[in-house]
Amino acid sequence: MGHTGMDADVVIAGAGPTGLMLACELALVGVDVLVVERLADRTGESRAGGIHARTLEVLDQRGILDRFMAVGELQSVGHFSGIWLDFDEFESRHSRPLMILQSAIERLLEERAVELGVRVRRSSEVRGIAQDDAGVTVELGTAEAASATLRARYLVGCDGGRSTVRKLAGIDFPGTPATMTAMIGDVELPDLTEEYIWARRTPRGDFSVIAFEPGWYRVITSNYDHVADRDEPATFEQLRESLIRLAGTDWGMHSPRWVSRFGDAARQASRYREGRVLLAGDAAHIHFPAGGQGLNVGVQDAVNLGWKLASVVHGRAPESLLDSYHAERHPVAERVLRNTQAQAALTRPGPQTDALREVFGSLIVFDDVNRHLCSMLTALDIRYPIAGKHPLAGRRVPDADLKTPDGATRVHELLHAARPVLLDLRGGAEPAATAEGWADRVDLVEAQSEDEHWPVPGGGETPAPAALLIRPDGHVAWVAATGDTPDIPALRSALATWFGPVAQS
């Protein structure tokens, strides 16, 4: 149990990838977590189809990447609105996207959450919330009773684009409505002779047919002549008719596993926090699912929020730390909305769009353009507004090879426990002495870099630093450059800003 009178420290609404990743992050550092999920069981629906580089790095930071690599398949290419990009040339150990279905991602994350002691309560739908100075009361509709209540210090809505938590918290969801309708389904196509069809354009729209597993295919069709009502059910017959309309055949389509619909609506929560209620993933932002970004942005939301919420729950940091979650993640999703709107515009049928795609495709062959778009889609270039002029400040830390007294390791392996790390690479006494006041929450690691230069996310390189403070989410909070006198007041400020005031003896 959580604090006195509480059913949990944190209740998470939604057992999708975002909610489960957040549950893992919190439980890893000793927060009592309860996940409530409306559905009775995992759907097994394929949904999202891949994990990008930054999310692979995050999973590596927690020591669980091998579970996902064992199930998925690495690809060397990705796309921007169906125009191919090369993901091979990146300063990451995991630059290539991993093709893995959302159903497998959810299974692996739930297994990890249960290992860490997370409780998952299914057939439990949030119907009401009430906040006070001490916590949140959550009213549930459950399979066992017409209503039940939970009490927690915080509630996080990870309950999708139609988030009940967001609505009950009174958080606006401004944006633009859908202008088209796409259908998606996992089906069998016995008469298909091609291995796959990628974003084939027609005067009425485009379609793709992709083999995910032997014997069945994912079919996606886009219709720009109709915007379906959000509550209109998606049917197998509608998908079949849509494919015939665009491709002239349905290739003998039968045995649907899953059929759904999506559009190009782009909306974002006006704020990610309302008191003790927070939002993450699709509950905070929805967009056209172009470039495979949605699931990845949600998981990265969870990793940004998890350690901050844990610090507040444990009383180590003030509640104001939670405001940095919105400050850092809202601009990230805002950029995703913009680039997916651009991709949606590039999919529209017509000779003008054809010409635009031809010009755009001619630009992508330039290395700088390819790198820029790949960095944007993968989130490898994110730089949070963290103080410091060093090129690594605010960026994700490179996964450099290190030599420690205990043997060889990598930077990401230092983050398996989801604790901050002060990495001392030059044996300077002052940074280590300064961090002693935060020894209960910051790990001090002395090591030597195996490389004289480290890559800078976004391009270029910099001499291996003398010391750096790494947040649990893998972003650099403070850096001392080699040859410079460490700015100890700045280190002390960074420690207090991100990990709370110095421990009192």
Image (cartoon, rainbow, N blue to C red):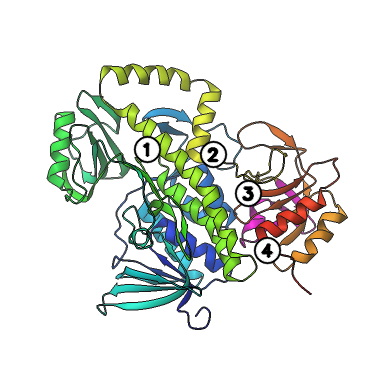
* CB contact under 8 Å: marks 2 and 4: no
Q: Earlier in the sequence, mark 3 or mark 4?
A: 3
Q: Toward the viewer: 242 or 150?
A: 150
66 relative position to 199: left or right = right
* CB contact under 8 Å: marks 2 and 1: no
* CB contact under 8 Å: marks 1 and 4: no
- The residue wearing badge 2 is 95
- The residue wearing badge 3 is 475
Mark 1 vs mark 4: in front: 4
Q: Earlier in the sequence, mark 2 or mark 3?
A: 2
- Label 2 residue SS: loop
Disc 2 to disc 4, C-alpha distance: 34 Å
Point out the stretch of residues depicted in magenta: 401-421
Under mark 3, the amino acid is: His
- The residue wearing badge 4 is 500
Residue found at x 51% / y 27%: 370
